[in-house]
Amino acid sequence: MSLADFDYHLPADRIAQQPVRPRDSARMLHVRADALCDLSIGDLPSLLRPGDILVVNDTRVFPAQLTARRGAARIGLTLDRPRSDGGWQAIARNGRRLRSGDVLSIDRAAAEGAAAEGAAAEGAAALTATVTDKDTDGSLGLRFSLEGEALTAALRAVGALALPPYIDRPHGPRPSDAVDYQTMFARRDGAVAAPTAGLHFTPALLAALRAAGVRCVTLTLHVGLGTFLPVRVDHVTEHRMHAEYGRISPEAAAAINTARHAGGRVIAVGTTSLRLLESAALADGTVAAFDGMTTLFILPGYRFKVVDRLVTNFHLPRSTLLMLVSAFSGRQRMLAAYAHAVAANYRFYSYGDACFLECRNKALPVP
């Protein structure tokens, strides 16, 4: 498979720059084997049945974009994830001359106009970061001068959301992005990017799903910087995914397994939920509790063990997420669906509309 197999043309005006309001008024394309149906996300309860289980990601986006200084040099930092040694993995812009041992002062001006959460930068503890190591791919290790809650408060004071580059914010994130770029399920800090399928959900939609007999459980997958990075190889099997931390509690795993054994379908909200469920799957489709890193890369030919249906947004050309949905519902079917969505003026990417997909490549029979 080549990277060109996952390309399509998207006019720039189809890229959503802000979400629709209310959130659950977004459009939704139901991609069936025999038809494409134009619906809205509010129609989701009618597509599910009693006993199905909805699995959502409760990760919370933290302000990972920082501005640092080393002497007179201004350096952009984007945090990726915490390391087991207490440091942080990050990437740097304008950081070619950085070396291990360099001490960076974090610029509080990074918060200006950036919708940073928490306390205002004024009065926050000063924050520095020491470069501990640097990789050939441009990533580096950092150790901050603060830890724990003090570091969390400082990042909220001086950081900004790392919005995707296709969301045009020349002066930084807007105040509204601090709310718009979090899902209603967000509970656990750790994501660089939002699990965007969850952005469509509201308390009213969740109540309608529960009234339809659909149960909802949460897992956690902290979306990392890899979600923003392009695939740089022509032969896609040579691509390597960045590691991301995920957790499925024993209680959530038991609820999913109980639903499956009773004939219910597993409905993943977002590719992040799907990847973690499949990472935790045993050969017979049982979901095990999970607490660790995943690098699962799903390409056409993958046989899905757990997930029966997927709620997801429209993804970038040549992206690993387009490869994933192609594996789930068929490459030609997904390219036809995307062509339909472009012609029908659907809104694309993080703030855009949704798809409802049916699994066409299940390792076990689909209920």
Image (cartoon, rainbow, N blue to C red):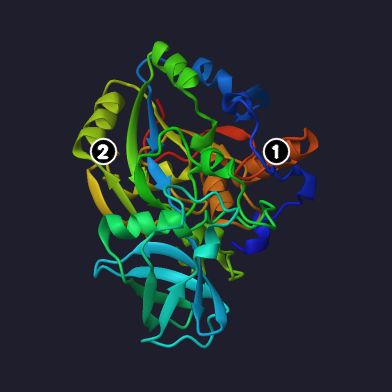
**Coordinates of residue 106 in the picture (x, y in percent):** 46, 70
Tell me the distance, in whole angstroms, between the alpha carbons under discs 1 and 2: 36 Å
Q: Above or below — where is 194 with respect to 44?
A: below
Q: Quadrant of residue 33?
A: top right
In the rendered view of the protein, which quadrant contains the C terminus? top left
Mark 1 and mark 2 lie on one chain; the one further toward the N terminus is 2
Q: Secondary structure at mark 2?
A: loop
Per the rendering, the mark at residue 347 is: 1
* Amino acid type of the residue that numbered disc 2 sits on in the rendered structure: Thr
Q: Residues within 10 Å of mark 1 (few under 14, many from 20)?
A: many
Q: Above or below — where is 308 with respect to 143?
A: above
User: Quick one: 243 or 6, which is closer to the camera?
Assistant: 243
* Amino acid type of the residue that numbered disc 1 sits on in the rendered structure: Arg
Q: Is residue 219 visible?
A: yes
Q: Is residue 242 visible?
A: no
Which residue is disc 2 drawn over? 286
